[in-house]
Image (tube, grey):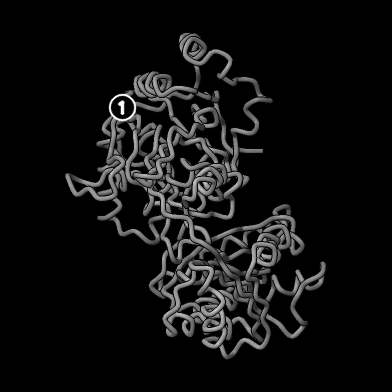
Amino acid sequence: MTQTPFLNPLPRSADPQPYADRLEHADMDFLRRTLGEDLLVTAEELHVYASDASLKTGRPLAAARPRRVEQVQDLLAWAQDRRMPVYVRGRGTNLVGDCVPVLPGLVVSTLLMDRIEEISATDFVAVVEPGLTTGRLQDACEARGLYYPPDPATVRSSSIGGNVITCAGGMRALKYGVTRDFVLGMEAVLPGGRLVRFGGRTHKNVVGLDLARLMVGSEGTLGFISKLWLKLLPKPEASATIMAGYGSHAEALGAVGEIFAAGIVPCALEYIGEGIIDLMTGSGPVPWPREVRSILLIRLDGSADTLPLEAEHLLRSMPTAFWHMTGLNPQDEERLWEIRRRINPTTFLAGPDKMADDVTVPRGQLVRALAEMEAIAREHDVTFLHFGHVGDGNIHANILYDAADQNMARRVEKARLAMEQAVLRLGGVMSGEHGCGICKDAGLQIPPAERALMHDIKAVFDPRGIMNPGKGY
């Protein structure tokens, strides 16, 4: 595998010196003293750290797995002095290459910093380290009658720190908000080794600039988040799920407006498009009749006494649905949501490789956006499959192809660019939750003046430009 060129230019740096591109004997001595057996340097050990879920590949010089914040401080002091690129890595589930070392450098993994320090039922706060998996935090909270709502599809494998630096969304974002809405504060190590704290455990704070929110979604370009204070909620008493079938994707997406017009804000509102329905119907048992061409999957939560009534009200608000199933207990709900989890593996029936995008448009533009994207797919002769969190306008646009076919790969890149441009024309954005990484050119969306401000802000945090160079913006 070869190093992947990055799309986004390196931000301006206060330091004109070139990046270090090798580890000298003195560097190795320092790293071994600092990390001991938690330093990885062999080709076999580094293979996994060269890539992430994007399958783009770079060149790590070494991988560090610190256990304590003091080790991180030492590493970032050394890296700034050497102008060594640093790539903070959670569990590698990112789809746009945020973890890929596009320049030779040091990968710093959060894998061994995964403790839950506290879950407070009085303050409704969790204090955690960045390597903790989101699913483990959710389980620990719910065992205490508490609730951490952010729920990305990779909830069992992705880390809290990774969710924060990409501002992950997920299926429950419609009602509860995205990751940034649950970050009260953080401790972070900046290049040079300075330890800072932004925010804390209070649920309201307007003193000074909100630097914690600035870190959220920064794609690892500003510093290493070493501790997080997260907002919790009371655990809902019960939930109910409705799966509704439609004759076309236009009818299904039109029903999204009907739901909101009825005064209903679901916990989750998911859409499965026609191509994926066809693959699922042809590859295994499904609960819907063959006439179903698109599906909405809707979850409500709240009081056990009122949920059946709310589910009935929801069904009445969707007159164009000609088939439905309702789950009013955990077992029946799980059967419906298992279908949602089948989407990703099912898409690979259409091709061995996938370009996975996550564009977002205003809700009122969903039907038009998909119509334009399908026209682009036909024009470039590519297989286009779509699903997503349509309650907040987030479409997961997937093009399936064979990367070994260079002509097909070029058509896919052209189709992707055309789709992103179409979304921008409709008032949308290129990413709702994955970020840009090395797979998207942020300059298509962010004007030069605003992008220059972002580069200037980065230079304050990271004057030598060592943190995740070439990523995001």
Q: Position of residue 126 (x, y in %)?
A: 41, 41
Question: Secondary structure under badge 1?
Answer: strand
What is the count of numbered marks?
1
**Is 200 placed above or below 252 here?**
above
Left/right of residue 134 with respect to residue 279 in the rendered view: left
Q: Residue 386 appears in which quarter of the rendering?
A: bottom right
User: Going 76% across and 74% down the picture, which residue do you hit?
Assistant: 287
**Near-viewer residue (66 or 42):** 66
* Quadrant in which the N terminus is drawn: top right
- On the question of residue 371 being in view, the answer is no
- On the question of residue 182 being in view, the answer is yes
Q: Position of residue 223 (x, y in %)?
A: 36, 34
Q: Residue 385 appears in which quarter of the rendering?
A: bottom right
Q: Residues within 10 Å of mark 1 (few under 14, many from 20)?
A: some
**Is 19 placed above or below 300 here?**
above
Left/right of residue 393 with respect to residue 153 in the rendered view: left
Q: Residue 460 appears in which quarter of the rendering?
A: top left
User: Going 77% across and 82% down the picture, which residue do you hit?
Assistant: 290
Q: Residue furthest front?
A: 305
**Near-viewer residue (275 or 85):** 275
Q: Which residue is mark 1?
A: 195
Q: Position of residue 132 (x, y in %)?
A: 52, 37
Q: Position of residue 18 (x, y in %)?
A: 38, 27
Q: Residue furthest left?
A: 207
Left/right of residue 315 with respect to residue 322 in the rendered view: left
Q: Callout 1, which amino acid?
A: Leu
